[in-house]
Amino acid sequence: MTDRVYRSNLLPCDHSLLIEKVILIFAFCSRQQEIEEKLIEEETARRVEELVAKRVEEELEKRKDEIEREVLRRVEEAKRIMEKQLLEELERQRQAELAAQKAREEEERAKREELERILEENNRKIAEAQAKLAEEQLKIVEEQRKIHEERMKLEQERQRQQKEEQKIILGKGKSRPKLSFSLKSQD
């Protein structure tokens, strides 16, 4: 019944005013609530962030030695890997240099062998030429000796003939026939 009385006491114009006020109050409250929620949310985020930062700092402080050891371990591992790679690269370069040096030595050996072969061939040709020249000189000397012997023989023959001729002219050595002179009577 009070509900009816209460309704009857209200005027239609008051009712709309009341609705507007309620809507305004509700909007204000809703707005206020949103602001409060936002402030709470921001405060919560700030506190969570502070808490997380504090926890991270505490955790870092607790694990500082462990983290430093891990960092040192990783640095040492990276250093070992780099040293290994550097040594491998140096070994590859050394092997390449050795191969290049071996190739140069092989090329020089081949050139030296070729030069020695050419030198031997030239020496053989020179020896052959010298032998041929010596043989020809020997032939020339032999021919000159024969010519000299022939000359000597001719000279001896000429001298012998000249002596023979002188003997004949001089009458020596029974070279002339004896002339016999005899007187015979003529009867």
Image: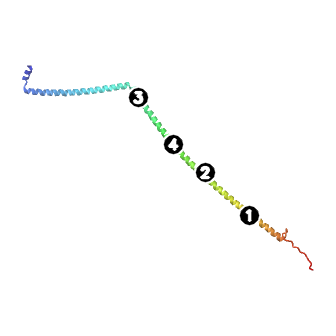
Marks 2 and 3 in Cβ contact (< 8 Å) = no
Q: CA distance from mark 2 to mark 4?
A: 31 Å
Q: Dot 1 surroundings within 10 Å: few (below 14), some, or many (20 or more)? A: few
For disc 3, the marked residue is 70
SS of the residue under disc 3 = helix
Give the numbered dot on residue 170. Answer: none
For disc 2, the marked residue is 120
Which residue is the extreme one toward the bottom? Answer: 187
SS of the residue under disc 2 = helix
Q: CA distance from mark 2 to mark 1?
A: 44 Å
User: Residue at (70%, 60%) from the top-left corner?
Assistant: 142
Q: Is residue 139 left or right of residue 1?
A: right
Q: CA distance from mark 3 to mark 4?
A: 43 Å
For disc 1, the marked residue is 150
Query: Residue 12's quadrant in the figure?
Result: top left
Tell me which numbered mark, 2 or 1, is placed earlier along the sequence.
2
Q: Position of residue 104 (x, y in %)?
A: 53, 45
Tell me which numbered mark, 2 or 3, is placed earlier along the sequence.
3
Amino acid carrying mark 3 in the image: Glu
Tell me which numbered mark, 4 or 1, is placed earlier along the sequence.
4
Mark 1 or 3: in front is 1
Amino acid carrying mark 4 in the image: Ala
Tell me which numbered mark, 1 or 3, is placed earlier along the sequence.
3
Q: Is residue 93 left or right of residue 20?
A: right
Q: CA distance from mark 2 to mark 3?
A: 73 Å
Marks 2 and 1 in Cβ contact (< 8 Å) = no
Tell me which numbered mark, 3 or 4, is placed earlier along the sequence.
3
Q: CA distance from mark 4 to mark 1?
A: 75 Å
